[in-house]
Image: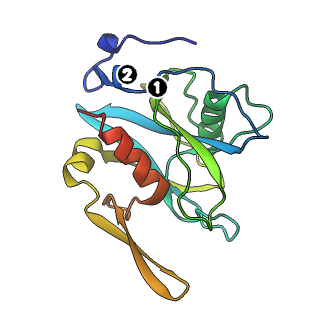
Amino acid sequence: MKDFAADNLAAPWQGLQARLLRLEHLPIEPARIAQAAVTLILRAEQSEAQALIIKRAEHPHDPWSGHLALPGGRADDIDEDLLATAARETLEEIGLNLHAGGQFLGRLPKLSPKNPRLPQLEITPFVALAPAAFKLQFSAEVADAFWISLPQLKQEGMSSRHTWTVDGVERAWPAYPSSRGPIWGITGRILNDFLNLFE
């Protein structure tokens, strides 16, 4: 697996790869736990570091229906490992081939949903740079996508809230603010892990 020296990366990504967990072969272990992989896709637009956020399509059988999220999904038998899962799901959901001009930099710690009502998955987040030129093409699972400023997210922190009524009781969760609504839950936790490394 090709690795890239951190000092060969253009600003604002210099030093980032050294702070991420290294890319390595992460086997798919269905007998142990259901697994999934997502990708935090980065770009620099007019020297501003940005991340791609998708809005999942509304679907009655999707526990994350309508959420702001990262492209990704469950591991499949055809995937060589979890990195292959992340690349395949990104291509299927938004038409972005990260092996054609893109660049995987590393990964973030694995995590799982805290809500016992959600499917119990082990999720591996990968971090990648977008190709220099690309066109997004959404699958039926994705309603929209947008780029968000990483310095702005880091500055504002989880200063917003997502409210949701559970069993007749309104509850609130901390969230990152965005023009499309709060980014919370698993995606908020992934962003938090990443922004702790982002300088």
Residue 181: mark: none
Q: Residue at x 64, y 40 (%)?
A: 89
Residue 25 placement: quadrant:
top right
Task: Name the residue beneath numbered marker 2.
Answer: 17
**Mark 1 to mark 2 CA distance (whole Å):** 6 Å
- Seen at 38% across and 46% down, the residue is 191
Q: Is residue 68 visible?
A: yes
- Figure quadrant of the C terminus: top left
Side of 156 relative to 58 (left or right)? left
Residue type, label 2:
Gln
Q: Position of residue 195 (x, y in %)?
A: 31, 41
Q: Residue furthest left?
A: 155
Element under disc 1:
strand
Q: Which mark is residue 106?
A: 1
Q: Nearer the viewer, residue 77 or 31?
A: 31
Classify 10 Å Cα crowding around label 1: few (below 14), some (14-19), many (20 and above). Answer: many
**Residue type (three-letter) at the residue carrying disc 1:** Gly
Along the viewing direction, whichever of 183 and 124 lies nearer the viewer: 124
Marks 1 and 2 in Cβ contact (< 8 Å): yes
Res 145 seen here? no
Secondary structure beneath dot 2 equals helix
In percent of width and height, residue 160 lies at: 29, 65
